[in-house]
């Protein structure tokens, strides 16, 4: 297991860290409605999207390690940038191999497009097979009708990747322009302040991405990549929360001495540091599985990482808030904003129970040799 970084990867991390450091006060104290200005800066000044697109489509062909480094820095800065959506979209589009997918990849690499997944519907939970939207062929395009819920970063997007069924078959994946006729968007703030939308589609023109009925095959590896990316973001959040909590305990005085002088509180910080290292190990494992493993290894690594990191994230974030006292849940301190972001990460792409079931199904597949549970 080689965990050393190349000079290019180190330069990418340091450049992004320096860029975000100059904006950290604004990022942690200002509103977080999918900061369009920040995302534009990350695209134009640092070209983060290049790391996700192959050279064939105008990028430099980075991989899971680059994503891990970027997401950890975004987590530390609490940067409301829709980079995770770009991870998911570029993975799915690259696997699709169709002309519309290739054209969109070029636009993403050039900073002209942002695609977000519109799959979730009321009562669908985590399973990708549960898509209620319908698609009807109309010449060279399809017409999609249905509703999608809690589509994060939708107000910033130029395109939606929409799951819908053609007839009674398995869901297919479609590409729709956000400016297309028939799209109605109801915007709101998620608990962490991120912009999100409920979307209604009525006979919306869309292009089939990949083969008919292949949405699950395209999206499963893409969502695994996004899960691991969020795990790296969680590591950045935990590191920053622990750092801020340590500083607070050094500054805050009680009974005539700094709080950090009390051994029980130092033990709390030590437990937080141990939890972070456990999470880091899981993120490293999952990142290497994405890079070198087969489909089952990638899926198992993503689910096991999700379970472990969510637990460590919950522990660290709760300890950070408790050690700050009542101020820890206010917006006046950045720690409360990190805590809310931690809640959203834990709720993304399935619960702990969802991933235990998935991991168990994968274990059964490995024992029986079946393709699917």
Image: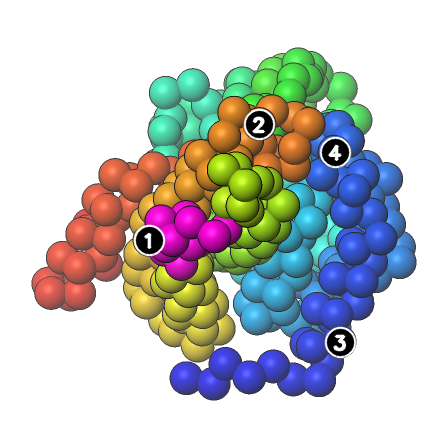
Q: Quadrant of residue 336?
A: top right
**In front here: 301 or 99?**
301
Q: CA distance from mark 2 to mark 1?
A: 28 Å
Is residue 319 found left or right of 296 in the rendered image? right
Residue at x 82%, y 58% (from the top left corner)? 19
Q: CA distance from mark 2 to mark 3?
A: 37 Å
Of badges 2 and 1, the one in the foreground is 2
Residue at x 82%, y 47% (from the top left corner)? 23
- N-term-proximal mark, 4 vs 2: 4
**What percent of the width, then of the height, locates residue 108?**
76, 53
Q: CA distance from mark 4 to mark 1?
A: 29 Å
- N-term-proximal mark, 2 vs 3: 3
Q: Which residue is mark 4?
A: 29
Q: Quadrant of residue 337?
A: top right
Q: CA distance from mark 3 to mark 4?
A: 28 Å
Crowding at dot 1, Cα within 10 Å, few <14 / some 14-19 / many 20+, comes out as some
Image marks 3 and 4: residues in contact by CB distance under 8 Å: no
Give, as a single range, the part of the protein colored magenta: 260-272
- N-term-proximal mark, 3 vs 4: 3
Q: Which residue is mark 3?
A: 11
Residue at x 33%, y 53% (from the top left corner)? 308
Crowding at dot 3, Cα within 10 Å, few <14 / some 14-19 / many 20+, comes out as few
Q: Which mark is residue 48?
A: none
Residue at x 80%, y 62% (from the top left corner)? 18
Against 109, is 9 above or below?
below
Going by the picture, which residue comes out furthest to the left? 368
Q: Is residue 27 magenta?
A: no
**What percent of the width, then of the height, locates residue 36?**
81, 37
């Amino acid at each position: 297991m080689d965990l050393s970084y190349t000079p290019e990867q180190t330069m990418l991390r340091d450049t992004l860290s320096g860029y975000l450091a100059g904006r950290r006060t604004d990022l942690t104290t200002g509103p977080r409605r999918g900061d369009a200005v920040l995302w534009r800066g990350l695209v134009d000044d640092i070209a983060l999207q290049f790391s996700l697109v192959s050279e064939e489509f105008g990028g430099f062909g980075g991989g899971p390690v680059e994503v891990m480094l970027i997401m950890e820095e975004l987590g530390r800065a609490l940067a409301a940038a829709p980079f995770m959506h770009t991870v998911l979209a570029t993975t799915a589009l690259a696997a699709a191999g169709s002309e519309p997918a290739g054209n969109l990849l070029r636009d993403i690499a050039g900073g002209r497009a942002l695609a977000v997944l519109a799959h979730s519907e009321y009562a669908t939970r985590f399973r990708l097979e549960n898509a209620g939207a319908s698609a009807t062929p109309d010449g060279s395009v399809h017409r999609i009708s249905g509703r999608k819920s809690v589509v994060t970063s939708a107000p910033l997007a130029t395109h939606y990747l929409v799951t819908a069924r053609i007839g009674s078959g398995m869901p297919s994946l479609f590409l729709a322009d956000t400016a297309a006729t028939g799209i109605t968007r109801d915007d709101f703030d998620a608990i962490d302040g991120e912009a999100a939308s409920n979307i209604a589609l009525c006979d919306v023109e869309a292009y089939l991405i990949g083969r008919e009925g292949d949405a699950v095959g395209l999206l499963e590896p893409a969502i695994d990549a996004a899960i691991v990316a969020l795990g790296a973001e969680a590591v950045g959040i935990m590191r920053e929360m622990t750092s801020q909590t340590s500083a607070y305990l050094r500054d805050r005085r009680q009974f005539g001495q700094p709080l950090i002088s009390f051994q029980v509180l130092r033990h709390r910080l030590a437990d937080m540091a141990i939890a972070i290292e456990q999470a880091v190990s899981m993120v490293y494992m999952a990142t290497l599985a994405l890079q070198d493993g087969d489909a089952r290894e990638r899926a198992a690594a993503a689910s096991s990482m999700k379970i472990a990191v969510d637990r460590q994230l919950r522990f660290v974030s709760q300890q950070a808030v408790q050690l700050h006292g009542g101020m820890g849940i206010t917006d006046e301190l950045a720690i409360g904003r990190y805590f809310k972001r931690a809640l959203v990460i834990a709720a993304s792409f399935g619960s702990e129970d969802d991933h235990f079931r998935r991991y168990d199904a994968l274990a059964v597949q490995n024992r029986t040799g079946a393709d699917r549970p």
